[in-house]
Amino acid sequence: MKKLKAIEYETEKFKIEGKYAYLYCLNGYGKAKINNNFLENKLKVNATTRNWKTVLTLFEMMTTD
């Protein structure tokens, strides 16, 4: 975890909270260096990623009658 926290990119920021990692990509996720494969390799876990639009769509689907 310490090695991961030491990695910084000017256009990408991330925060780890418990079992979740939050990633902000100024230039978009498609151009991100910190991506799903990066996190899986560094943390030795299976991971999945969702962009914010998808998160909002899933939330709307769950809260709409």
Image: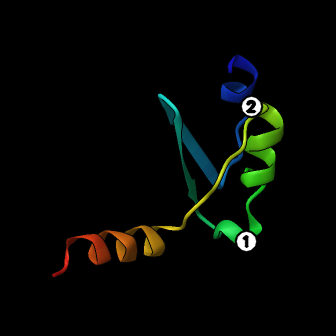
Q: Secondary structure at mark 2?
A: helix
Q: Position of residue 48 (x, y in %)?
A: 64, 55
- Residue 41, placed above or below residue 30: above
Q: Nearer the viewer, residue 54 or 12?
A: 54
Res 43 label: 2
**Residue at horizontal 70 percent and vertical 38 percent from the top:** 8
- Bin the neighbour count of mark 2 within 10 Å (Cα to Cα): few under 14, some 14-19, many 20 and up: few
Res 8 label: none
Quickly name the residue at label 1. Answer: 30
Label 2 vs 1, first from the N-terminus: 1
Which amino acid is tagged 1?
Gly
Which amino acid is tagged 2?
Leu
* Foreground tag (2 vs 1): 2
Q: Position of residue 22 (x, y in %)?
A: 51, 46
- Residue 30, placed above or below residue 4: below
Query: Disc count in the image?
Result: 2
User: Label 2 vs label 1: CA separation?
Assistant: 20 Å
Q: Position of residue 21 (x, y in %)?
A: 55, 41
Q: Nearer the viewer, residue 23 or 54?
A: 54
